[in-house]
Amino acid sequence: MSELDRFVGRVVALRADLGDGERLVAEVKEELVPLLQRSWLPPQLLDEQAQIPVRYLLHRSDAVTVFAILSPPGFVSSIHDHGSWGVVGQVTGVEREVVYEMHAEAEVGGPGLVGLRQTTSTELAAGDIVAIVPPHRDLHEVRTLGSTPSLSIHAFGRDPLQGGFAYFEPRLYEPFRYSGLWDNEPPGALPGEDGHPPHG
């Protein structure tokens, strides 16, 4: 049995025992550790000269979606949420994660609009794992630091590309839902819009 299959099996069992929430995420963080190795990943994700982001689907089921993101030096994601619990582990490179929270609508003067306030900024190196737990820790921006690409493994309770998250245009503070395909999925594999979403 591969490490990925073992991880998926553990998530299935944990969700059956714990449901969704902070206890589940704490357990899944521990289970993710063996996946933070380069040895089992496809060569497309090990390109040290990468110039564009690569978003690679590794597993998708009702229990968990696992994917990898390779980001070139200097890449900055949109500010986005995820629509689900999740864990993100750093394989190689260094990233800075900036976490935000929302203001009340009245503070930006319009129904349907939100204001954003930065709460934390953390540098993530190989082996570091962060939790995504809606609604209080589910809104962030990610930036690749240094001169080499960064590679991270993500596990979420649903496929975030299938209408699972929103991204936020900083000047308008208005969320936009996104649907689309992973870079290694053929066109038409699932219903979705063209284009590339923000970093996970």
Image (spheres, grey):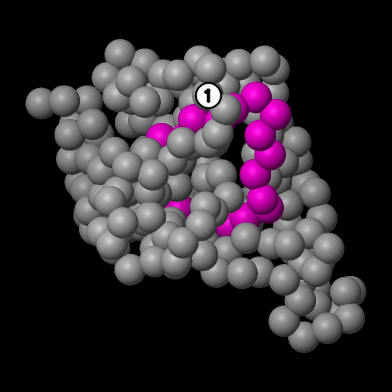
Q: Nearer the viewer, residue 106 or 54?
A: 54
Residue 105, given in percent of the width and then of the height, sits at 80, 77
Q: Which residue is mark 1?
A: 50
Q: Secondary structure at mark 1?
A: loop
Residue 10 painted magenta: no
From this view, report whether residue 86 is shown above or below residue 83: above
For residue 33, say whether it is visible. Answer: no
Q: Nearer the viewer, residue 48 or 40?
A: 48
Q: How many marks?
A: 1
The quarter of the picture where residue 75 lies is top right
Which residue is at a point 49% across and 30% down the rendered structure image? 70
Residue 79, given in percent of the width and then of the height, sits at 68, 52
- The stretch in magenta equals 67-85
Q: Nearer the viewer, residue 49 or 116?
A: 49
Which residue is at a point 73% across and 52% down the rendered structure image? 100
From this view, report whether residue 134 is shown above or below residue 147: below
Answer few, some or many: residues within 10 Å of disc 1's Cα (few below 14, many 20 plus, some between 14 and 19). some
Which residue is at a point 46% across and 36% down the rendered structure image? 54
Which residue is at a point 57% across and 27% down the rendered structure image? 51
* 188 lies left or right of 159: left
Q: Quadrant of the N terminus?
A: top left
For residue 101, say whether it is visible. Answer: yes
Residue 186, given in percent of the width and then of the height, sits at 28, 51
Prevailing secondary structure of the magenta residues: loop
From this view, report whether residue 137 is shown above or below residue 26: below
The quarter of the picture where residue 107 lies is bottom right
Instruction: Name the amino acid, label 1.
Output: Ala
